[in-house]
Amino acid sequence: MSNVPADLKYNKSHEWVRTLADGTLEVGITDHAQHALGDLVFVEVPEAGRVLKAGEPCAVVESVKAASDVYAPLAGEVTAGNPRLSDEPEIVNTDPYGEGWLMRMRPAPGALTGAALLSAADYQKVLEAEGG
Amino acid sequence: MFPPTEGERRLQRLISQVTGQKGGRRRGTTATRACRLFLFARGSVGRHTPLFKLHQELGARIVDFGGWDMPVQYSSQIGEHHAVRRAAGVFDVSHMCVVDLRGARVRALLQQLLANDVAKLGTPGKALYSCMLNERGGVIDDTIVYYLSDSWFRAVVNAGTRDKDLAWIRRHAQACAVEVTERTDLAMLAIQGPEGRAKAVQLLTAADAGTALALPTFVGREVGGWFVARTGYTGEDGFEIMMPAADAVPAWRKLNSLGVASCGLGARDTLRLEAGMNLYGNDMDESTQPFESGLGWTVAMEPHERAFIGREALAAIARAGSPRKLVGLLLEDRGVLRSHQRVLIPGGGEGEITSGTFSPTLERSIAFARVPAGSGDAVQVDIRGKLLNARVVKPPFVRFGQSLIRLSKGPS
């Protein structure tokens, strides 16, 4: 079974969102997604200052066998890409909800309240419906 | 039957969606052709080898491969890759199509059907790698043929091309009165790696083990009711063993108990690419000829009187010079080369990557690319709109566990 922490928000395309103390957001891919992709060997994260629309591809995670886009869960401006991932892409596999975060962003005004993010329980239902 | 679970199907959709296979909504990442082979859900149940239930039991992720439900990986693709480079791994290759060709004129048939010349096979058991061409010189398939006797050859062809291959072979076999029999009764296991042969012979009696260990490279023979061949697709030593379907599961379990790792098609792909071996459908197909596919060495133009199919087309290409060539690439920058990425040649001209991956042995990205014949050693590859530097290198990249490529500078 995939690990789905209760304190995070999710979307159906398997990204997670954590609200940090200063109101900015941390974004990564879920345990289910990293498991589905397999051993990651290259991660490309967005640069600080990039303005994203909700659903826009903003990062790329590549496993041995496939390249996959990661989508912005909501609109906002990137404040940081995880600098460790260029040398250690595998930490997305080993710690997808912690050290393996992909980017931090400041949500656009109203974006967080307007975003149709899922609770952990609802994301778990998505996974169960998929048989995963 | 054991259809893929809804979860597996959803995963395939997830991955095919994020790899941009449905085209569409944005600057997409470019999925590899290999990915497509691995990941495309067909929406119908594929064929199963005799080991299918065991793969499921072992926790393999199952994907469609040429119409077959096959294990792409068990735990970690990179771990399985290293197991083969450093110790031993076993692959289920029962999806490949084994065809027996019997008849007094079988040699004449194969001298017509194959671009390589079976006249090179003087010793029973000896194997030959060859392309089977159409009249235009395009590659219908690649195959390994074993010379078993003057009236019996065995060919192994790709799973994804099975139907067209059998139809082509049968069409030409009639005139030579050669009987064509697909050996669906056999399973095939590839046991590969520096410890592969020593582990594999523990499946045999002591006397048979001695016989198997004495097999020279690229030779196969019947041993204890099995056909054991010292061949493979990994760049390591090892055996490919054809056995009655019922023997496959106990053999696999015994190999696992001896420490031989279960390996999926994912590791098979990275191993073969490191080893400089082509994959049909990626690196060559009916629209390409051997000289632009790195396979000129498999074409026997001598003796000139041998009239194999495709000969005239190839002779014309050889006279004019092939306009393109297949080369190895090593990515100097960070990223992963994937099939269908555009290769830019300094001073003009373009090529295309035919197979690309991350090399677990080199910890760098490697590829095959088809480029203009006059291209030099430094090229650039368009990866999602960025031009990254790659160096042309001569395959194989890795052989017998050792890198053959000079890694002059790390990825920047």
Image (cartoon, coloured by chain):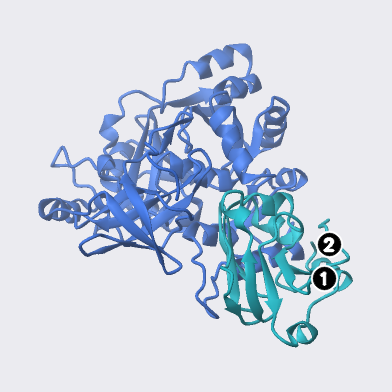
Q: Chain of mark 1?
A: A
| Amino acid type, mark 2 | Val
Spot the residue most to the front.
Answer: A22
User: Disc 1 versus disc 2: distance between alpha carbons?
Assistant: 8 Å
Q: Residues within 10 Å of mark 1 (few under 14, many from 20)?
A: many
Chain B: drawing colour: blue
Q: Is residue A11 above or below residue B402?
A: below
Residue at image point 41% right, 24% down: B217
The circle on residue A123 is: 1
Residue at image point 15% right, 37% down: B303
Residue identifier under label 2: A4
Chain with cyan colouring = A
Judged from the image, the secondary structure of the residue bearing numbered disc 2 is: loop
Where does residue B403 sit, x and y in percent of width and height?
43, 33
Residue at image point 69% right, 84% down: A108
Q: Is residue B58 left or right of residue B77?
A: right
| Amino acid type, mark 1 | Tyr
Circles 1 and 2: CB atoms closer than 8 Å: yes
User: Can you say which quadrant of the picture contains the N terminus of chain B?
Assistant: bottom right
Q: Is residue B124 left or right of residue B181?
A: left
The front one of B408 and B135 is B408
Where does residue B355 sit, x and y in percent of width and height?
43, 54
